[in-house]
Every structure is written in structure tokens, then in C-alpha cells.
Image (spheres, rainbow, N blue to C red):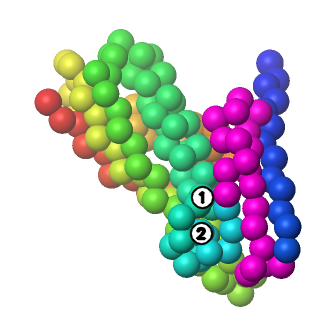
Amino acid sequence: MQINRTASAHWTGGLKDGKGLISTQSGALKDYPYGFASRFEGIAGTNPEELIGAAHAGCFSMALSGQLGNAGLTADSINTVAAVTLEKTDAGFTITKVHLDVTAKIPGASDEAFQTAAGNAKAGCPISRLLKAEITMDAKLVS
């Protein structure tokens, strides 16, 4: 099975004074602004690292749900925050790591079963496998 999804970006101007618009095939983002200031100066708008974080958090949460299902468990909730680190290295700006902060409420789950499922999801999520960055995680099971 092969699934293809698309996203597009339109850019005008130079690196620092230019402006971009990003869109997704689904329409979830339609001509949403991004640029140097939203990436490096904290100005409103999105940036590639934020979008990678959103993709990774969403992908991981789905993968964890699947791993829990394999263990006969169903989560009441899974909340994942992906913190993406962009650093200037000798090779240029590089995403060097992603930290997943996960909190889940899973009736009947032991911490051991949860940690196993979370570790398998972190390793097996397609976005985790895509990234060459260090990926760390804190996973908390709440009751």
C-alpha cells in the first residue's frame, strides 16, 4: 500500500524580508503565512519546525494508540507535545533533536505496559523513522 500526500509552499522576496504561504492538500492549512521572522524571531505565523513537531506529535499519538490496541488497551486520552530543536551546526541549521512529552490516561494499564507501548510507538512512528535527529521522550501514565 502506498499513500501520497502533498503540501505546498509559495515564497516571494529575499530570505529575511520575504514572505511565504504554506498549504496542505486537505485544506487544513490554506495560504498560511510563514517566514524568517516567524521562524527565528518569534513573530506570529508558522515555521517548518513547528509543522514537523505537529506531524510528529500526531503520528506518535496514533502509533501509541495502535500499540495499546495490540496490548488489548484503549486510551481515554493521549496528549503529546513534540519539542523540536533547531541548531546552527557546522553543516548549517539542523533539526538536532525532538523531545516527546506524553501524558496518557489508559484504564487498566500498568506503567510497564504503557512504557513498552510508548517505546514501541516512538521507535515505529513513521515520522520518528523519517527524522535523523535524536528523539527522546518522557511518558506519564495518569489515573
- Asked which quadrant contains residue 30, the reply is top right
Which amino acid type is shown beneath numbered disc 2? Answer: Ser
Q: Quarter of the image containing the N terminus?
A: top right
Left or right? Give the position of 83 relative to 23.
Answer: left
- Mark 2 lies on a secondary structure that is helix
On the rendered structure, is 109 left or right of 102?
left
Residue named by callout 1: 46
Which of the pair 62/35 is nearer the observer? 35
Instruction: Evaluate whether residue 103 shows in this view.
Output: yes
Question: In the rendered image of this protein, does residue 44 appear above or below residue 109?
Answer: below
Check the image and report above or below for 26 versus 23. Answer: above
- State which region is magenta: 14-33
| Residue name at image x 55 percent, y 36 percent | 59
Point 31% across, 27% down: residue: 77
Looking at the image, tell me whether mark 2 or mark 1 is earlier in sequence order: 2
Label 2 vs label 1: CA separation? Answer: 6 Å
- The answer to whether residue 116 shows anywhere in this view is no
Q: Which mark is residue 38?
A: 2
Majority secondary structure of magenta residues = loop
